[in-house]
Image (cartoon, rainbow, N blue to C red):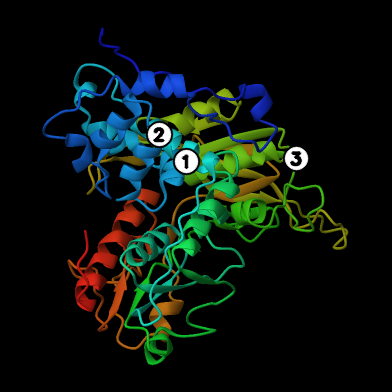
Amino acid sequence: MPLIPNKYPMPTQDARERARNFNEVALGYTPELAKSEAQRCLNCKNRPCVKGCPVNIDIPGFISCLKNGDSEGAYAVISRSSSLPAVCGRVCPQESQCEKECTMGVKFEPVAIGRLERFAADEHNKRGIKEVNAPAADAPRVAVVGSGPSGLSCAGELARHGVKVSVFEALHRPGGVLVYGIPEFRLPKAIVSREVEGLENMGVEFFTNVVIGRTLTVDELLEQGYKAVFIGSGAGLPGFMGIPGETLNGVYSANEFLTRSNLMKAYSDGSDTPIMKGGRVAVVGGGNVAMDAARTALRLGAEKVYIVYRRSMTELPARREEVEHAREEGIEFRLLNNPTEILGYNNPDDPRDPKNGFVTGIKVIKMELGEPDERGRRRPVEIKGSEYELPVDAVIMAIGTSPNPLIKNTTRGLEVNSRGGIIIDETALTSRENVYAGGDAVTGAATVISAMGAGKKAAQSILEKLGIAHV
């Protein structure tokens, strides 16, 4: 069979149509496309792709199943390592992890590992197979704080080995950032619900509307008989620039904006959740969250959406696929630009004017790239005299998040670093005995798959602590 140099393209919605709806953009491979793409895998002996996967999925193994048309076998292989295959196949940055290490990528495009993982998971879900495997009545109990990717991964690994797991979620629906942060058009919430249901069938219990540090503390969980606690509470504390005008009406953190739309369904006609719709929107930042916020604003009816980012496209950290989709949908990138002030309406002659205190624009200064910073990225430097005003009606700050200090402040002896991340050792153990942590609560905002890898690693350490062999 001749070597196919390029990935088989992912079918997608037309850009003009999808820019105004919340349906999933990527439509998924057909069985024929999946089998053809799987044939591109060289089945290397040294398996570099596996080393590039934070949860060490047997990638050649599951792709071999797809070569033979066995999608259920492929799903079984993936599930030995990953608790969330349908999620990872959609949102993980495979291009910088497993696909980056793919041998095919040395001369050609790497195998579309993420697209194949999504296909295997979706085919399994279509069959509606329910695997029920409840833990024994006398099984050891472990508490998991947070139901985002790290918490779900930890819970799945523990449950797979017979541990009775209780997951405590602060919001009213399990899923963490998977439901409040990632838009429907990238990750349908039905997919997340299915993954959660799969864990429930394994005996995992979910308790929502429980804020650890308020409703219960970590110390109280240990006192209730849980043998260990895993903290996977994420990094939900938004960052701001500290520039004038950030308190004006129409300024959102990306967390707030996406939560209102994704979790609270502000995009629905019947929703009572207020959100800015229409007008012109500036999104400050260049990561995946910025792309999500910009594309959501567009779908909510914005006339014009700008991405304002202080570096160039080379340094922009968002996934290339998301950037391409945003551009196709008409979002304008103002690169090497940085806001210095948010402007607002003020009518001193009529303090009752309802427009008072609302955003009218942002003041922006142009930048150029100077010498590299401590991380090797060229530092942006202001160009004097280049300031200009950009008229907008809303500003969304997507410049990063950090861990909420609530758990640290209510847990005796829990040590954190200068950025608020929980300090752990190589086994994911914190400074508190029997308390483990992982994901964004430790590292700050990162990827779904890295958080899953951290949750899985912590679960394996907990299993060793409980004297349970893990495979």
Q: Which residue is drawn at 66% across and 36% down?
A: 298
Local secondary structure at mark 3: loop
x and y percentages locating residue 75 in the rendered image: 38, 41
Amino acid type, residue under disc 1 in the picture: His
Q: Do the residues labelled 2 and 1 touch (CB within 8 Å)?
A: yes
Q: Which residue is drawn at 21% across and 58% down?
A: 471
Is residue 11 visible in the rendered image? The answer is: yes
Q: How far apart are marks 1 and 3 (CA)?
A: 39 Å
Amino acid type, residue under disc 2 in the picture: Ser
Is residue 93 visible in the rendered image? The answer is: no
Q: Nearer the viewer, residue 440 or 362?
A: 440
Q: Distance between the residues labelled 2 and 3?
A: 43 Å
Q: Which of 145 and 320 is in front in this view?
A: 145
Q: In which quarter of the image is residue 274?
A: bottom right
Q: Mark 1 points at which residue?
A: 124
Q: Is residue 187 toward the left or the right of residue 8 in the image? A: right
Local secondary structure at mark 2: helix
The vertical placement of 118 against 154, above or below, is: above
- First of labels 2, 1 by sequence position: 2
Viewer-nearest of discs 1 and 3: 1
Q: Residues within 10 Å of mark 1 (few under 14, many from 20)?
A: some
The vertical placement of 209 against 63, above or below, is: below
